[in-house]
Amino acid sequence: MPTYVPIMLDCENRICVVIGGGQVAERKIKELLTGAANVTVISPSITVALRQYRDQGKLNWLPRKYAEGDLEGAFMVHAAADDPEVNRRVAEEAKARGIIANVTDQPALGSFIHPSVLRRGRLLIAVSTSGAGPLAARAIRRKLEDDFGTEYEEYLDSLYDMRKMIQEQVSDTAARQKLLRKACGPDMLESLRQGTFRLRSPEEIRQWINDNQEE
Ligand SMILES: C[C@@]1(CC(=O)O)C2=NC(=C\c3[nH]c(c(CCC(=O)O)c3CC(=O)O)Cc3[nH]c(c(CC(=O)O)c3CCC(=O)O)/C=C3\N/C(=C\2)[C@@H](CCC(=O)O)[C@]3(C)CC(=O)O)/[C@H]1CCC(=O)O
Ligand SMILES: NC(=O)c1ccc[n+]([C@@H]2O[C@H](COP(=O)([O-])OP(=O)(O)OC[C@H]3O[C@@H](n4cnc5c(N)ncnc54)[C@H](O)[C@@H]3O)[C@@H](O)[C@H]2O)c1
């Protein structure tokens, strides 16, 4: 089992091919669509949900079996057919073309795997067991759901606004870093825990920067 390197991929408008249109393909495609990828599914059949996405213009569907050459121009591929031989051939084409590949039934033939994911707006927590036990990854993710509630969405939106304004308004590196540490520090987290957290307006952020710079 490899030691994986975690990264966050920008798939927006990139061509992501998925071979197979069953339950597993559906799960991977939902993540790809969340990332605004340009998804093409190649599979004789697809699930009801995938058919809906196709009808809504959210993905392309080629209703046929995989054929060599299908990966031309692709950024990424998921081999999610229920036939190990098909998935192996997809993995081989991906390797020959230098395309990153997720092979759902034989992960060692591909170049990346999916973690279990918890999203709270801009916060993304990814849990992986490196392939040892996907259900354990899911169980750990579910446990984290209690600690990281929906309030984190607002928290990170606010942090994003504050960080942008601090970067724009404070040119001195040391002062900027001090403010950035304060911005995500105990005050904000405490109000988050007490349920009193609220988004600051640009004017309030400007005021906060002034008040805290003077200290
Ligand atoms: C986390 C999650 C993300 C996602 O898929 O989005 C994910 N699998 C999930 C569910 C799940 N997977 C399986 C079951 C049935 C129960 C069981 O067998 O345990 C269930 C439960 C279900 O389906 O309900 C079976 C299974 N999975 C893999 C194999 C092949 C093998 O291990 O060799 C087989 C045997 C197939 C067979 O026997 O035919 C392989 C992989 N699955 C991974 C990810 C990667 C490693 C993740 C890690 O551990 O870090 C990796 C290596 C590759 C990849 O898929 O990227 C998602 C939970 C999402 C969530 O709810 O949060
Ligand atoms: N990685 C994971 O998380 C995970 C979890 C469970 C199962 N699996 C494995 O993933 C694979 C898919 O599982 P599933 O539950 O989605 O299966 P499924 O039976 O629901 O779907 C299989 C899909 O593959 C398509 N297909 C079959 N032959 C094809 C071909 N030649 N070209 C293109 N498409 C083809 C079928 O039309 C169908 O849409 C299985 O091998 C399964 O063992 C992986």
Image (cartoon, rainbow, N blue to C red):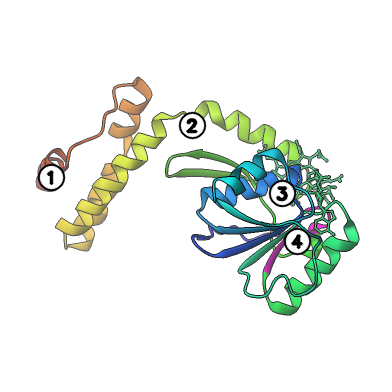
Q: CA distance from mark 2 to mark 4?
A: 29 Å
The label shown at residue 206 is 1
Give the amino acid type for the residue marked by disc 2 in the picture. Phe
Sequence-wise, the earlier of marks 1 and 4 is: 4
- The total of numbered circles placed on residues is 4
Residue at x 20% of width, y 52% of height: 165
Secondary structure of the residue carrying tag 3 is helix
Q: Which residues are magenta?
A: 100-107
Q: Disc 4 marks which residue?
A: 2
Sequence-wise, the earlier of marks 1 and 3 is: 3
Give the amino acid type for the residue marked by disc 1 in the picture. Arg
Give the amino acid type for the residue marked by disc 4 in the picture. Pro
Secondary structure of the residue carrying tag 1 is helix
Q: CA distance from mark 1 to mark 3?
A: 47 Å
* Left or right of 26 on screen, residue 165: left
Residue 191 seen anywhere in this rendered image of the structure? yes
Camera-nearest residue between 158 and 172: 158
Tell me the crowding category of disc 4: few under 14, some 14 to 19, or many 20 or more residues within 10 angstroms, Cα based. few
The label shown at residue 148 is 2
Magenta stretch: residue 102 in it? yes
